[in-house]
Amino acid sequence: MDHIIVEGGAPLHGSVEVSGAKNAALPILFSTLLAPGNHRFTNVPHLKDVSSTLALLKGFNTESTLENHTAVLECKEPSNFEAHYDLVRKMRASVLCLGPLVARYGFARVSLPGGCAIGARPINLHLDALEKMGATIKIEQGYVEAKCKKLTGSVISFDTVTVTGTENIMMAASLAQGTTVLENAAKEPEIVNLANYLNTMGAKIKGAGNSIVTIDGVNNLRPAQISIIPDRIEAGTLLIAGAITGGEVNVKGFDPVLIKALIQKMHEVGFQIKPLTNNSGVHLSSLKEWVSTDVTTAPFPGFATDLQAQFMALMCVARGTSIISETIFENRFMHVQELQRLGADISPKTRIAVVRGKPQGLTGAPVMATDLRASASLVLAGLAAKGKTKINRIYHLDRGYEELEIKLQSLGAKILRGHS
């Protein structure tokens, strides 16, 4: 099993480019089920979750190639409409095949999803919406089975903001009969990227990126091509990596507006962050010491839950006490006990953590990654710790970060991947 060893204490310097966004690539890849033919995507990251998605699509008779960050998918008529547990258990985003299959073929059988164990994340909002659009839903033996003759447009009001729910129903509604209105829709830029691709395919979607999205169903869609947007979570992670080491870095190839909430918080604690030319990234310069601040996660454009663990690592070596509140997932503090192994002073409750910063630094130790973003937080903490930190179970990291250790090495980090 692979692990990463980090030797802390080296300030990061230089420039690094952000890869394509995992959370944009996955729904766009699944959207190919809506239209037969050849689809082409650029800026696709080489990640385990992307590989898992392509493997799942192969089961639906979709052939694919991925070379030099360009993916070409040939979507043919499937003879199978089941997403098997062995593939779905690896990645929660697998549920995104449900909407397209039901919309186009009137049937799907999808295993209940897996992925990171950061909370319940039920898919009832997806299922309630499909039922309202005319599908019959049955859950048995760990599988969701959905049937319909033809989905019909409806007003769908989500009880809570759901990113995958918005994506799933937006895809399904593209081939439904009539108009669907999504209320309390998620606003993430990855949803806008998906909507733009669907519209390029011939869909009629208005309002993506706002809380109300309107979809006028069409009879059929056609293959097209689009570029995957840069990964704002990777951008934020790399920015914090430069900051936690007291370094000076350029994080390039993304729109800083997409992590505005993080940048504002980093300004508050003392870092200088300036946009690069044409808003194509940011330049970060550090102080020797920074102060604590409080953070509460929120749906976009608020402070991203996917950056909470990384920011907590930064607060572990700040001056003062910070309170970090997690409002999105109920089980997203599993990294706390591993950060404590490095000497962090954190008092966690269910959704609130009190972090008493230690400007004098942390101390390296063996730690265990529990989920994707927790993996990143442990790498960042290791960069700031005295001595060596060994991070085990980094397959989580490979699900969502493309060659993170190589990018950090290019900035001067002492970090190596090993196998044991």
Image (cartoon, grey):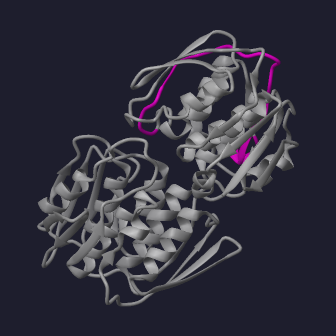
- Can you give x and y, in whole percent of width and height, for residue 291 in the image? 68, 13
Residue 147 horizontal side relative to residue 337, left or right = left
What type of secondary structure mainly makes up the magenta span? loop
**Of all residues shown, which one is farthest toward the top?**
320
Residue 183 horizontal side relative to residue 229, left or right = left
Note whether 246 is above or below 410 in the view shown.
Answer: above
Is 415 within the magenta? Answer: no
Question: Residue at 14% across / 65% down in the picture?
Answer: 138
Q: Which residues are magenta?
A: 276-300
Task: Name the image quarter holding the N terminus.
Answer: bottom right
Splitting the image into 4 quarters, where does residue 226 fall?
bottom right
Task: Name the image quarter holding the C terminus.
Answer: bottom right
Front-most of residues 376 and 2: 2
- Can you give x and y, in whole percent of width and height, for residue 302 in the image? 47, 33
Question: Residue at 76% across / 20% down in the picture?
Answer: 361
- Can you give x and y, in whole percent of width and height, for residue 366 in the image? 70, 37
Note whether 86 is above or below 60 in the view shown.
Answer: above
Question: Residue at 23% across / 51% down in the picture?
Answer: 125
Residue 236 visible to an observer of this rendering: no
Residue 388 horizontal side relative to residue 183, left or right = right
Splitting the image into 4 quarters, where does residue 57 fall?
bottom left
Note whether 340 is above or below 165 in the view shown.
Answer: above
Residue 103 visible to an observer of this rendering: yes
